[in-house]
Amino acid sequence: MPKVLTQEQVERYREEGYLAPIPVLSDNEVRRYRASYEELEAALGGRPKATDLSLTHLHLPWSWDLIHHPRVLDAVEDILGPDIVCWASSIFPKQPHDPGFISFHQDGTYWGLNSMDVTTSWVALSESIPENGCMRVVPGSHKEPVHPHKETWAEDNLLSRGQEIQVEVQEEDVMDIVLNPGEMSLHHVNIIHGSNANHSDGKRIGFAPRYIRPAVEQVQVAHRQPAVLVRGRDDHGHYDLIDARPKDGPVGEIVEHHLSAARRHLQELTSTKAATQVRG
């Protein structure tokens, strides 16, 4: 039996490729995590690139705590089972009236993972609505194969290479994922998704851990990748498991090491884009 989701919700995720909203954080937790993110953002110059906001869980205690949050993991366990690895994480901020957008794409195209046992948790640290550029998905598209993608390198595209799916997405097929602060969505690695620009006066912030079953392997990489076993056990040994919470300290002293790791991770993903892909 599921832990926190109903059986109907689990079946809906299987059928539609996403599930939302799922309440996970209290108001006090939202304030704590958002304040910690704002401190990181200031240390990164005020308007950090999305590519510099990955893998924060390996270096920042608050981010480590969030990937381990029991209510997040209870919902993920209902989808993936009792053994869970956090393979990566990303933070997606959009400043007020920011033209940045995310083109429609499938994550399975370029992560280099060899299985579909992958889900992303998207935790809202602010309101996430159509006006400020909430995530948008094409329900059921996770059942399709991974489609060809084009690297557009578009200036305002927040993806690392402006990856864009080469199929026409009809607006009537798209669903907006509306979340209040402290709610999250879960979405499948192959679902077609993206987001529009922020046309509002407020900031939109989402924290997105990527969870996998331990059997999932990242193929054709030059080095073993770090990951965190957040629940259960790992009998496969595909990753260098990190088990120590990052030490507390001034964010400014952590940022340089963090940026080096985040950019190295991006280079690894770029080098594996032609690797075995997740197939629907």
Image (spheres, rainbow, N blue to C red):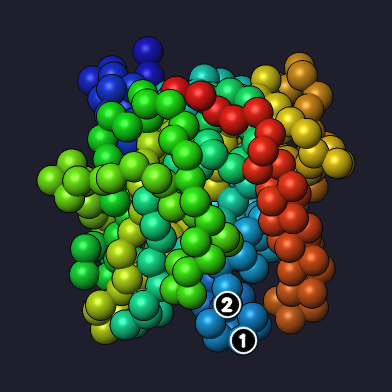
- Front one among 204 and 107: 107
- Residue 48, disc: 2
Q: In the picture provided, is 5 more to the left or to the right than 65? A: left
Q: In the picture provided, is 95 more to the left or to the right than 35? A: left
Name the residue located 65 percent from the left edge and 28 percent from the top edge: 276
Name the residue located 53 percent from the left edge and 56 percent from the top edge: 151
Please say whether residue 235 is visible from this viewpoint.
yes
Q: Do the residues labelled 1 and 2 touch (CB within 8 Å)?
A: yes
Residue at the far left: name it.
172
- Front one among 241 and 261: 261
Disc 1 marks a residue whose amino acid type is Gly
Please say whether residue 62 is visible from this viewpoint.
no
| Residue 165: % across, % down | 41, 46
Disc 2 marks a residue whose amino acid type is Pro
Name the residue located 38 percent from the left edge and 19 percent from the top edge: 2
Q: For mark 1, does the 10 Å Cα neighbourhood hold few (<14), some (14 to 19), or many (20 or more) residues? A: few
Determine which residue is flagged by label 1. Answer: 45
